[in-house]
Amino acid sequence: MAENLIVVGGGPVGLSFALAAAQHASLNVRLIESGVPLEPSREENFDHRVYALSPGSKAFLEALGAWQLLQRERIAPVRAMRVWGDDRVSELDFEQRSPLAFIVENRALTAALWTLVRQQQRIQIHAPCTPAELLRDDARDCITLTLKEGGSIDAALVIGADGANSWVRQQAGLPVNAKSYESFGVVANFECERSHDGVARQWFAADSVLAWLPLPGAHISIVWSVSTERSESLLAMNPQAFADSVRAAGDESLGQLQCVSPVARFPLRRILAERCVANHVALMGDAAHAIHPLAGQGVNLGFADARLLSALLVQCSPLHSIGDLSLLRKYERERKESVMALATLTDQLKALFSHPAKSLAGLRNAGVALADRQTWLKRRLMQYAMQ
């Protein structure tokens, strides 16, 4: 008999997992999304929210059929990455023959995944629809999700792919370690005077981290991690003054810049679920782990969650429920090392470059220069980031 699987959250991670899970004939998938599903569009302007997808994430999306629905002219391969310390001299370069990552717009990727979800007969969509309560039924060995719009759904497993403020996580009583970085990520897109040549650029400073990501043509998307006060100041600038600030902070690497999108900001914080599974419940994506964006790996961690758990469900014996805690704990164990390693790395880098002690400045910049000379270390870092 087919088991019911509920996925709460219609972002890229939740949608990709629903599609992967629906390929298994033993599962009936219900997708719960509070918003209106995105439709494909042909907007000329680039979305100011973009993802740096790893080759591993690209392969996962190709297997689902989503990558093939994206417009090729809207995807920018990252062929190299250059990172500078706060002395503007110490430099770490990454480059190889195949792309390190692919810059894809959130809007386009989400719409492509929704297109496939609508076509999948084993996925029943509830959207817009708001979950009201999760109730475990030990007697029937299942979990029941009730809806504010009325009705309820029994399931063997509920997936929380509903973001950093996860409703599923709260309902399941799964504790988190949360820390605010007391800063914001400011995002916008620019047209550049000179070509970026497929190079992603990042500058560490004592009070900020600035990343320039290549977009198709002579365009870039930026993420500027700054203090709350400075983020307010940047958003208050007129477009040209803001573009001049971004240009100066990036050492005028691409000449004159023209802002070609709205300027937005989002709070930066680290949220790590102490446990990401319980009986009949599992978390993935930002619901399980939201980290600092300086490594650009947030959505890739989520796609890796989706890949692993969908594969484990395939291997699940017909004699065991997909909500069995022993199966879910295997998923939790296998993801924990990668997630903690990346969360710790980003935390330490942020702390190192924002530390006020002048004695650390020379040490950290020397460390950047030393790392650039260690070919084996750079190869290892690239292999990890490309998963």
Image (cartoon, grey):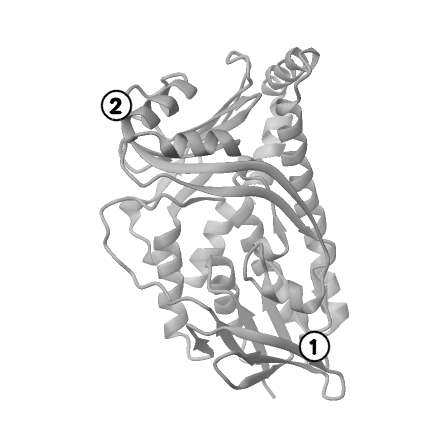
Q: Is residue 113 left or right of residue 350?
A: left
Q: Position of residue 195 (x, y in %)?
A: 29, 25
The kind of secondary structure element at disc 2 is loop
Q: Is residue 212 above or below residue 36?
A: above
Q: Position of residue 184 (x, y in %)?
A: 51, 37
1 or 2: tag closer to the N-terminus = 2
Nearer-the-camera pick, 124 or 371: 124
Tell me the kind of residue under disc 1.
Ser
Q: Is residue 163 above or below residue 53?
A: below
Tell me the kind of residue under disc 2.
Glu
Q: Position of residue 238 (x, y in %)?
A: 30, 30
Q: Which residue occupies 30% across, 44% down? A: 46
Q: Position of residue 277 (x, y in %)?
A: 71, 64
User: Residue 2's image quarter?
Assistant: bottom right
Q: Can residue 196 be seen by looking at this rendering?
A: no
Viewport quadrant of the C terminus = top right
Q: Is residue 315 above or below residue 46?
A: below
Instruction: For label 1, count other residues whose C-alpha is less than 10 Å away and answer few (under 14), some (14-19) or many (20+).
Output: few
Q: Which mark is residue 138?
A: none
User: Which residue lies under the disc numbered 1?
Assistant: 317
Q: Which residue occupies 38% across, 25% down? A: 246
Nearer-the-camera pick, 186 or 234: 234
User: Which residue lies under the disc numbered 2?
Assistant: 193
Nearer-the-camera pick, 115 or 152: 152
Query: Separation of disc 1 and disc 2 at Cα?
Result: 58 Å
The kind of secondary structure element at disc 1 is loop
